[in-house]
Image (spheres, rainbow, N blue to C red):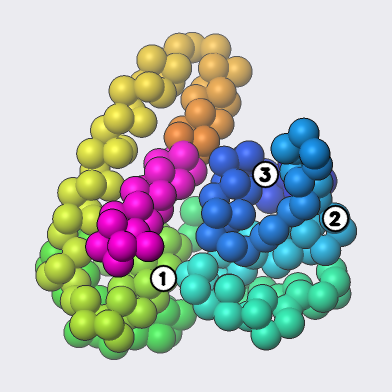
Amino acid sequence: MLERLRPEFPDVTISKIRFLESEGLISPERTPSGYRRFTEADVARLRFVLAAQRDQYLPLRVIREQLDNGRPQARAAEPEPVDPLPEGARLPRAEVLARAGVGDDLLSALEEYGLLAADHDGHYDGGAVSIARTVASLAAYGIEPRHLRAFRAAAEREVGLVEQVVAPLYRQRDPAARGRADEVARDLADLSVDLHALLVRAGLRRLTGT
């Protein structure tokens, strides 16, 4: 599975795929012994999800809606990237607003509460688009940027934990060690997101009694 996806999505990991499965975006069959069996349709859905995240910074909620509406049925149904961002892209404020579809007041609030920050030239990385879109979706439920400082604090603590693990690898002179550090950092990031989602769901189950 990874071998088929990594030429197009080199950062994909097993934990990332399992997280997407836990979010209901894919549902591979299970063999009697418990192993996942991915069909061509599963692979097409995975490519759709990964491309939508990478090229359009769509939140999972929007991607799930597109899948529920019948996309994709096959490889040809995958989304066509609209002006995809190159690796390491830096965006001016106006472009972040246009791509995210949010107002300047929301972006200013994200900066005020430490959820986004521009560099010294006033540019943002590509992830700013996804953050702004996600916060805008939360705002529809009455959750405002000022309520999200706990998310930032939790993310900073998780980054600190990952740094403790990978810092020794980055200090090594061996180029292979740096590549390994990059891979470990990506995997730990995916696992952290997975654990966060599981803990939130567990808390909601206690809240709702289900």
- Mark 2 lies on a secondary structure that is loop
Residue 175 in view of the camera:
no
Amino acid type, residue under disc 1 in the picture: Val
Q: Residues within 10 Å of mark 1 (few under 14, many from 20)?
A: many
Q: Residues within 10 Å of mark 2 (few under 14, many from 20)?
A: few
Q: Nearer the viewer, residue 130 or 22?
A: 22
- Mark 3 lies on a secondary structure that is loop
Which residue bears the numbered disc 2? 39
| 112 lies left or right of 152 | left
Q: Position of residue 191 (x, y in %)?
A: 46, 39
Which residue bears the numbered disc 3? 10
Q: Nearer the viewer, mark 2 or mark 1?
A: 2
- Residue at 62% from the left image edge and 40% from the top image edge: 13
Image quarter hosting the N terminus: top right
Q: Nearer the viewer, residue 12 or 87?
A: 12
- Residue at 15% from the left image edge and 59% from the top image edge: 149
Vertical placement of 169 versus 188: above or below? above
Q: Nearer the viewer, residue 26 or 175?
A: 26
Q: Nearer the viewer, residue 64 or 88?
A: 64
Residues at badges 1 and 3 in contact (C-beta under 8 Å)? no
Which residue bears the numbered disc 1? 129
Q: Position of residue 46 (x, y in %)?
A: 70, 59
Marks 2 and 3, Cα distance to the nearest angstrom? 21 Å
